[in-house]
Image (tube, rainbow, N blue to C red):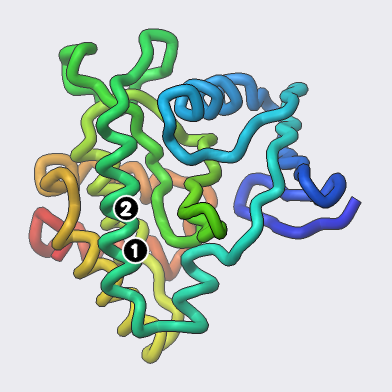
């Protein structure tokens, strides 16, 4: 197998020209991730098709196209429009009610109002395929308040630094995202920052930026 991708928790291997294997390094079960992806595919949301799941291994369609992050590195002038695209994907996701079997996080207190949340929505998790954008990496998915999902995206984007030039693109991306964001992140911003700071994979520089963000405006601006 050829290693074609590596995230903070999992590696992605090419099985052949049409399928990949996503394997969690520390074990666990990908069953709920596979189940939520199948559920979303069933309601028409763009996710990779799942072929098989076995413990920490998830076999899915191999997607063709760059990630949004890769496209931004090549064409930074598209940052603002990509931010709006990111917000549009989140709006479509938040139209999906959370099924009863899905774990809850940042719950609204009323199960009927809980929606499917991605909780790790950022440009590296969007693949720009010829058929349109596809959202990947559903390991953090839960049912809950859409404002928390929006707030977490703000916290993720505000915590990252790619250098002076590319950070300008990140700011434009965030501006486009907030302009079109489906939900006001302010009510859940403090919780989102706390959740990010609790992530064991968080880099020290990201943690410092997030702590500064916590002292700023409640909506992450």
Residue behind mark 2: 153
User: Which one is nearer the viewer's eye here, 7 or 113?
Assistant: 113
**Against 13, is 171 above or below?**
below
User: Which corner quadrant of the image does residue 6 belong to?
Assistant: bottom right
Residue behind mark 1: 157
**Residue at (59%, 39%) from the top-left corner?**
48
Q: Is residue 132 left or right of residue 53?
A: left
- Residue at the outermost right position: 1
* Residue 126 in picture, x, y percent from top left: 48, 55
* Residue 212 in picture, x, y percent from top left: 23, 66
Q: CA distance from mark 2 to mark 1?
A: 6 Å
User: Which corner quadrant of the image does residue 159 belong to?
Assistant: bottom left
**Residue at (17%, 46%) from the top-left corner?**
182
Q: Does dot 1 land on a helix, a strand or a loop?
A: helix
* Residue 57 in picture, x, y percent from top left: 75, 32
Q: Is residue 101 visible?
A: yes
Q: Is residue 125 visible?
A: no
* Residue 177 in picture, x, y percent from top left: 24, 61
Q: Does dot 2 land on a helix, a strand or a loop?
A: helix
Q: Residues within 10 Å of mark 1 (few under 14, many from 20)?
A: many
**Residue at (27%, 34%) from the top-left corner?**
94
**Against 139, is 85 above or below?**
below
Q: Are marks 2 and 1 in contact (CB under 8 Å)?
A: yes
User: Which one is nearer the viewer's eye here, 187 or 83?
Assistant: 83
For the image, the number of numbered tags is 2
Pick the quarter of the image with the C terminus. bottom left
Q: Is residue 142 left or right of residue 185?
A: right
């Amino acid at each position: 197998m050829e290693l074609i991708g590596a995230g903070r928790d999992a590696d992605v291997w090419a099985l052949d020209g049409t399928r990949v294997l996503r394997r969690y390094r520390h074990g666990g079960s990908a069953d709920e991730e596979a189940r939520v992806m199948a559920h979303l595919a069933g309601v028409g949301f763009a996710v990779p098709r799942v072929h098989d799941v076995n413990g920490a291994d998830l076999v899915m369609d191999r997607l063709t196209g760059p990630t949004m992050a890769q496209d931004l590195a090549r064409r930074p002038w598209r940052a603002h429009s990509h931010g709006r695209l990111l917000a549009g994907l989140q709006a479509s996701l938040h139209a999906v009610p959370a099924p009863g079997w899905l774990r809850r996080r940042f719950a609204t207190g009323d199960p009927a109002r809980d929606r499917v949340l991605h909780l790790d929505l950022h440009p590296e998790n969007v693949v720009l395929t010829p058929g349109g954008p596809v959202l990947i990496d559903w390991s953090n998915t839960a049912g809950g308040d859409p404002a928390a999902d929006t707030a977490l995206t703000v916290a993720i984007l505000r915590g990252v630094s790619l250098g002076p030039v590319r950070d300008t693109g990140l700011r434009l991306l965030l501006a486009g995202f907030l302009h079109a964001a489906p939900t006001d992140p302010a009510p859940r911003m403090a919780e989102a920052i706390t959740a990010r700071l609790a992530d064991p994979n968080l880099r020290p520089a990201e943690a410092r930026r997030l702590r500064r963000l916590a002292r700023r405006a409640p909506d992450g601006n």
